[in-house]
Image (spheres, rainbow, N blue to C red):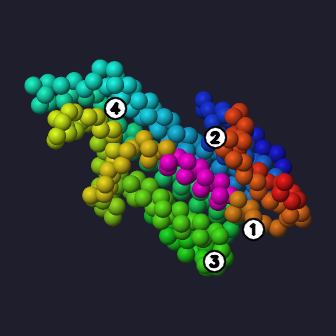
């Protein structure tokens, strides 16, 4: 089985997303008896659809993080610009933060949608799973339970990820085309300043976002977590699909600790025959 990795962006295999979706995914599928049609379809989804969307999320996250650090560094060097006898604080902001946040959520949503398509490469999914409008993997979880059983690791993983993080990402994105609808409203707050009621000192507040009346959370922190979660979710879904395939020899998946990964190509997983060493 052979594949061609085409560089379509500035990121190489030193980027964990490229290493773990391109190089790693190819190696994970090699030991299994998969038809050329199925392997090509799975590869096209991983390499040509999930990876570009996740790299776009990564680029947006890095850009906003760099802008945030630039403003924080300037505040640490010069302090907050105080005017009118200390009653007004002037602080810089990140340009087009709201647009960048929406673009991030669009790409995150697209990547998650394509992960569902990856599952359908291996199984005959029903039409509802394939629909873009299937809002938050709820129907997929039900379908997996029906196919494999409630106690199977596949529906357990999907249901857990949905409840912990995936559903909220999906809902945040749905506020963009349908503001005030099922998922409510997305609030994005740029840099601002708050004044301590006791010391009367001004302090910078980093950009945050939230849905409706939820507590605001830091945008850059959340974006980094979402990128990592989608990457890991993509890997885990592929592994779960492969584990259910028949193989002549026993195949195990080895996970490398973060500190043991090659900086030039930091793959997380490897498929191998025989006993784990």
First-in-chain label (1 vs 4): 4
In percent of width and height, residue 19 lies at 68, 41
Give how far apart the Cα atoms at labels 2 and 1 are: 26 Å
Please tell me whether residue 68 belongs to the stretch shown in magenta.
Answer: no
Quote the CA–CA distance across marks 1 and 3. 15 Å
The structure residue drawn at horizontal position 31% and vertical position 25%, both measured from the top left corner, is 75
Between 165 and 119, the one nearer to me in the picture:
165
Q: Is residue 219 left or right of residue 31?
A: left
Q: Quadrant of the C terminus?
A: bottom right
Task: Work out whether residue 255 can be spotted.
Answer: yes
Q: Residue at x 75, y 68 (%)?
A: 244
- Image vertical order of residue 115 relative to residue 65, above or below: below
Disc 2 to disc 3: CB gap under 8 Å = no
Q: Which residue is mark 4?
A: 94
Report the magenta stretch's main SS: helix
**Whole-Å distance between the Cαs marked 1 and 4?**
47 Å
Instruction: Give residue 247's quadrant in the image.
Output: bottom right
> What is the x, y in percent for residue 133?
46, 63
Chain part drawn in magenta: 225-238
**Sequence order check: which comes first, mark 4 or mark 3?**
4
Mark 2 or 4 closer to N-term? 2
User: Residue 194, position in %: x, y?
Assistant: 22, 38
Please identify, in this view, whether the residue under mark 2 or under mark 1 is nearer the observer: 2
Crowdedness near tag 3: few (<14), some (14–19) or many (≥20) residues, C-alpha within 10 Å: few
The one nearer the camera, 1 or 97, is 97
Say which residue label 2 marks.
16
197 on left or right of 107: left
Circle 1 crowding by C-alpha within 10 Å: few under 14, some 14–19, many from 20: few
Query: Disc 1 designates what residue?
Result: 244
* Pointer 3 residue: 151
């Amino acid at each position: 089985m052979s594949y061609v990795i085409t560089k379509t962006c500035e990121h190489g295999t030193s980027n964990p997303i490229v290493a773990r979706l391109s190089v790693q995914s190819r190696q994970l599928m090699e030991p299994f008896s998969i038809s050329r049609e199925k392997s090509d379809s799975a590869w096209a989804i991983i390499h040509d659809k999930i990876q570009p969307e996740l790299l776009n999320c990564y680029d947006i996250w890095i850009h906003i993080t760099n802008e945030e650090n630039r403003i924080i560094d300037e505040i640490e060097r010069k302090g907050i610009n105080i005017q009118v006898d200390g009653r007004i604080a002037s602080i810089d902001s990140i340009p087009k933060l709201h647009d960048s946040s929406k673009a991030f959520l669009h790409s995150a949503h697209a990547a998650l949608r394509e992960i569902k398509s990856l599952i359908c490469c291996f199984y005959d999914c029903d039409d509802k799973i394939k629909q873009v409008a299937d809002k938050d993997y709820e129907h997929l979880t039900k379908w997996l339970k029906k196919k494999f059983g409630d106690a199977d690791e596949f529906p357990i993983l999907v249901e857990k990820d949905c409840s912990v993080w995936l559903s909220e990402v999906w809902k945040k994105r749905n506020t963009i085309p349908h503001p005030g609808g099922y998922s409510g409203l997305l609030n994005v707050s740029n840099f601002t300043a708050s004044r301590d009621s006791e010391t009367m000192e001004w302090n910078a507040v980093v950009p945050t976002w939230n849905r409706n009346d939820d507590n605001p959370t830091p945008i850059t922190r959340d974006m980094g977590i979402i990128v990592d979660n989608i990457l890991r979710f993509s890997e885990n879904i592929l592994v779960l699909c492969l584990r259910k395939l028949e193989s002549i020899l026993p195949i195990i998946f080895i996970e490398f600790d973060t500190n043991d990964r090659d900086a030039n190509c930091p793959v997380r997983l490897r498929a191998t025959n025989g006993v784990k060493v």
